[in-house]
Image (cartoon, helix red, strand yellow):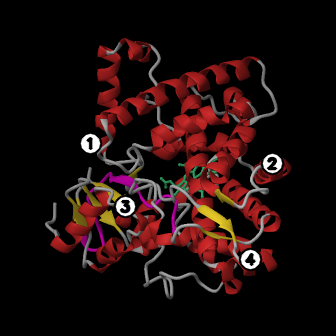
């Protein structure tokens, strides 16, 4: 390992990894310092190299042969600690005894989509591509509009509200439940399980209690999804879980564990990320009333605004890869087997790639350029849900701005805490009130 330690960066990194609220809200000084390093920084805290420049991030995630996704959600040491925890609970705690016969999602050997490579990835991606074909996604639009309208109806009579519990939390869950064919009344079950599991993403110091909540969530979510897959295999319906359960329309034969993994990845990926993007966008609009008023009078600017929010407040700040061979990135030697963290959010603010990278670009001129951000990844793992995320966030903002009066933040933007994670990024709350005259 090259010694590239830099005390200044180390200090910033410790603050971020230690989840200091002001650093989690605004990690951009840390990313800037990483980009200014001559080579790649090696993070002792995370046990991996940190890739921060736009071109380097893009190269690493585009080369799936050289960089495996086997451990995409965290360096191997953290993933292995999670697995060990499950087995230790299964061995000692009667509450988890069943996990030995029917391992929960986290403990599976089969890998699909985001943590699969090569043929296994291509096979499972083929099914999901079918599931998210534009024709299917567009068919969902009327239902998504209804879901959004119902939630807005529930808050339109009030003078103040928090957009997170009232809108950005339930909305993506209800949408993904509708897409997959999960009964809408069960959305809160999924939302709770996914929320508990997400607490372990980008957080190294979970309390014992939170660890147990995660284990329970893994176990209960896995049991629910397994039961749903079994019932759809016997009696398929016109929904996405049925497509996955039967493999209809593809020649892919998915094992029961692969099916489970795919459904849970879709539920997980479609929930936290979209909700965080919407919450960041609403926070921005509550603090910039001129922008809010412009988007109200020119709704065609909503899509470029959302692209800029994806770039500036990337809901997935970073993910991980592992080098399969000795290689170099930015002139730094990376030995085979090394973990690297690819920081999409840093590449998105790289001044070598974007002019005035830390600020919102003029929206009128953005239509094509904005989409070059890294927030949905690159290459074979490019976000399969991007068309759905773009559709449902656009519908939500159009309706919120079309149906609710001008709103302003109740608390200053810099006092709003972000979710405690250095991977998933979004506000804990967006408390607003009707604009005062
Ligand atoms: C704003 C919302 C979203 C953001 C920012 C986002 C971000 C990402 C990123 C960065 C990746 C690349 C992972 C990698 O390279 O390792 C990814 C992959 C993925 N996303 Fe999304 N996502 C969003 C919404 C969604 C939605 C709505 C769904 C599904 C309903 C979804 C499902 C997936 C899946 C299944 C993958 C794995 C694809 C593969 O490995 O082939 N995402 N997403």
Disc 3 packing (10 Å; few <14; some 14–19; many ≥20): some
Quadrant containing the C terminus is: bottom right
**Comparing labels 1 and 2, the label whose residue is closer to the camera:** 2
Q: Secondary structure at mark 2?
A: helix
Q: Secondary structure at mark 1?
A: helix
Q: Secondary structure at mark 4?
A: helix
Residue toward you, 264 or 309: 309
Q: Which residues are magenta?
A: 313-332
Task: Say which quarter of the image contains residue 401.
Answer: bottom right
Q: Does the residue tagged 1 have its C-beta within 8 Å of any atom of ligand 1?
A: no
Mark 4 touches mark 3? (CB < 8 Å): no
Distance from disc 2 to disc 4, alpha carbons, whole Å, reads: 22 Å
Q: Which residue is mark 2?
A: 150
Q: x, y (%) of residue 127?
A: 66, 40
Residue toward you, 23 or 10: 23
Distance from disc 4 to disc 1, alpha carbons, whole Å, reads: 45 Å
Disc 1 packing (10 Å; few <14; some 14–19; many ≥20): few
Disc 2 packing (10 Å; few <14; some 14–19; many ≥20): few
In the picture, measured across the screen, residue 315 lies left or right of residue 290, that is left
Does residue 182 appear in this view? Answer: no
Does residue 31 appear in this view? Answer: yes
Q: Which residue is mark 3?
A: 21
Distance from disc 3 to disc 2, alpha carbons, whole Å, reads: 33 Å
Q: Which residue is mark 4?
A: 295
In the picture, measured across the screen, residue 254 lies left or right of residue 393, that is left
**Comparing labels 3 and 1, the label whose residue is closer to the camera:** 3
Q: Earlier in the sequence, mark 2 or mark 4?
A: 2
* Total count of labels: 4
Q: Earlier in the sequence, mark 3 or mark 1?
A: 3
């Amino acid at each position: 390992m090259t010694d590239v330690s830099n005390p200044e960066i180390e200090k910033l990194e410790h603050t971020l990894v230690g989840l200091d609220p002001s650093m989690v809200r605004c990690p951009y000084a840390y990313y800037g310092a990483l980009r200014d390093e001559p080579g790649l920084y090696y993070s002792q805290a995370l046990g991996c190299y940190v890739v921060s420049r736009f071109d380097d991030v893009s190269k690493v995630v585009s080369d799936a042969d050289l960089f495996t996704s086997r451990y995409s959600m965290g360096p191997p040491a953290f993933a292995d600690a999670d697995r060990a925890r499950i087995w230790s609970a299964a061995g000692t705690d009667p509450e988890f005894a069943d996990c030995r016969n029917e391992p929960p999602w986290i403990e599976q050997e089969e890998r699909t989509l985001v943590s699969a490579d090569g043929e296994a990835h291509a096979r499972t991606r083929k099914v999901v591509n079918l599931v998210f074909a534009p024709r299917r996604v567009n068919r969902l639009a009327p239902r998504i509009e209804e879901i959004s309208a119902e939630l807005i109806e529930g808050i339109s009579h009030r003078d103040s509200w928090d957009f997170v519990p009232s809108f950005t939390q339930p909305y993506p869950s209800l949408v993904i439940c509708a897409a997959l064919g999960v009964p809408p009344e069960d959305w809160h079950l999924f939302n709770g399980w996914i929320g508990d599991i997400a607490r372990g993403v980008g957080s190294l110091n979970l309390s014992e209690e939170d660890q147990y909540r995660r284990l329970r969530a893994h176990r209960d979510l896995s049991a629910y999804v397994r039961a749903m897959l079994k019932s759809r295999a016997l009696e398929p319906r016109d929904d996405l879980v049925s497509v996955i359960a039967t493999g209809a329309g593809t020649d892919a034969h998915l094992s029961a564990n692969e099916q489970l993994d795919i459904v849970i990845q879709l539920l997980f990926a479609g929930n936290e990320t979209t909700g965080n993007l919407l919450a960041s966008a609403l926070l921005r609009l509550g603090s910039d009333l001129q922008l809010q008023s412009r988007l109200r009078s020119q709704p065609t600017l909503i899509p470029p605004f959302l692209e800029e929010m994806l770039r500036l407040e990337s809901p997935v700040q970073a993910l991980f890869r592992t080098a399969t061979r000795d290689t170099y990135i930015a002139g730094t030697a990376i030995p085979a087997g090394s973990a690297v963290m690819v920081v999409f959010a840093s590449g998105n603010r790289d001044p070598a790639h974007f002019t005035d990278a830390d600020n919102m670009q003029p929206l009128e001129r953005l239509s094509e350029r904005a989409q070059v951000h890294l927030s949905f990844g690159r290459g074979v793992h490019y976000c399969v849900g991007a068309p759905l995320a773009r559709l449902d966030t656009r519908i939500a903002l159009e309706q919120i701005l079309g149906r609710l009066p001008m709103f302003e933040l109740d608390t200053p933007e810099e006092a709003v805490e972000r979710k405690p994670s250095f991977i998933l990024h979004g506000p804990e709350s967006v408390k607003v009130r009707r604009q005062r005259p």
